Image (tube, coloured by chain):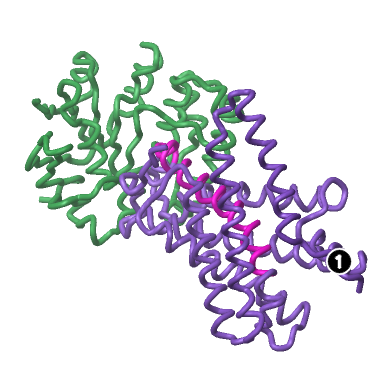
Amino acid sequence: MPPPRLRAAKLSRSVQERRLFHGIELQIDPGETVALRGPSGTGKTLLLRLIAWLDPLADAELFLDGLPAAELGAPVWRSRVCLVAQDVPAHPGTPRDLMALVAGLRHQRGRAAKDPLALAEAWGLDPRAWDRPWSALSGGERQRIALALALSRRPAVLLLDEPTSALDPEATAAVERSLRDQTILWVTHDPTQAARVADRFVELHP
Amino acid sequence: MTELAEIGPWQLALATSLILLNGALSLWLRLGLTRKVLIASARTVVQLLLLGWILVPIFTFEQPWMVMGIGTLMIALAAREAVRRSARTYRGIHGAAFLALLIGCGGSALLGSAVIVGVDPWWDPRYLIPLLGMVLGNALTGLSLGIDRCLSVLDEQRPRVEALLSMGATWWEAARPVAAESVRMAMIPILNAMSAVGLVTIPGMMTGQLLGGTPPDQAARYQIVIMFMIAAAVALGSVLAVLISLRALFDGDHRLRHERIRRRDR
């Protein structure tokens, strides 16, 4: 049997002595979408950050297709297991500048990529938005740009934190359609969205 | 050379009345600055008299170790001042500032004294110490601006840096835009000074030389050398300080260690 696409074990996190989650194990098979649910403050975002290796791992173990994260190194791991944050920050310049910057990263260069402009256009984003300064873009526009950039790099796993929280129902439906067949750990507050997109659920309790 | 008019105790006392004017204005307008004016004035008097007093044996005995000792002390004090001006700090910031000023300013002052002016011996305190002082005084402003910008961007725009890391950027790929922004910030004062010098301002060193009787064209040439030495020191020093700071705030797993940045309570 092939190894799962993503396997994470011993995921634990405390914030100021308060234990948020402890010893979580998680497996995601290729093409599977797992919805991560739970009330605010249970550490859903921190769980995503831990799997993205943006916070210290402590005892946590991470594997991609059976390969340990430590063997890949953090930048390669993150280029394959890609986190898209809920609030997309403003970068210097325009989204097109960021697109060029990302395409030129050492661990992204030369990798076959999709066209992010075409991806985002299918979600109702005017292609001219890519040439506006970030400060002139709405939350929904930034969200679609960040998601399109991540998806365009063909990551093995997407870690999504409320990726459609600023989108209207029409754009949300289009995004959900595009993400079918991707391997995703998807944080969502919306139970109906979780039911639509997820093959399985993981629930965090306070 | 014309004789330099001497400043005796009576003249110093007369100058002090200028500061009393400051204090009187503060009292009258209720600026709340009286205490600060007094402390700053007292520091000026004590520090400069002390400097003059310390420099006497160094100029008299002309020992290289004495020159190096006072030079190192000046760099350490400048590093402390540069760090004090930054609104944020981290463990190791003093070492970073010291190393950056040592290499940037020490290197620039040595080059100026030994190669450009061609002093013999190269450590002649009469040249090396004022040159180092001039370079340090200006470079520490640039350095503190550079460090301050670097830390504030990492602190306030953390999501921007982490968004790049999330796409697979190495720590340096994520930090490079921050480094560029910080060094640009550090260079602004010296670039402004270089544009205004001679038109709006007569810098301290040139003033000193003119008072000391140096012909104006020679004083101008010295000042040009000094300005370029400062520019080199700011560039090299701020690049070093920013790079060392960035390296200290990212870890071996290419993570931004945001918790290492501390805001200073003011």
- The residue at 36%/48% (across/down) is B256
- Amino acid type shown at disc 1: Ala
Q: Is residue A24 left or right of residue B10?
A: left
Tell me: residue B178, above or below residue B248.
Answer: above
| Image quadrant containing the C terminus of chain B | top left
Let me know if residue A53 appears in the view: yes
Q: Is residue B92 left or right of residue A194?
A: right
In the figure, the shade used to draw chain A is green
Residue tagged 1: B219
Instruction: Report if residue B158 lies within the magenta region.
Output: yes
Q: Which residues are magenta?
A: B131-160
Let me know if residue A103 appears in the view: no
Chain shown purple: that is B
- The residue at 26%/47% (across/down) is A53
Tell me: residue A1, above or below residue B106.
Answer: above
- The residue at 54%/84% (across/down) is B65
- Tally the numbered discs: 1
Tell me: residue A97, above or below residue B216.
Answer: above
Q: Nearer the viewer, residue A107 or A156?
A: A107
Magenta stretch: dominant secondary structure = helix
Question: Which percent across, then down, holds residue B31?
Answer: 59, 27
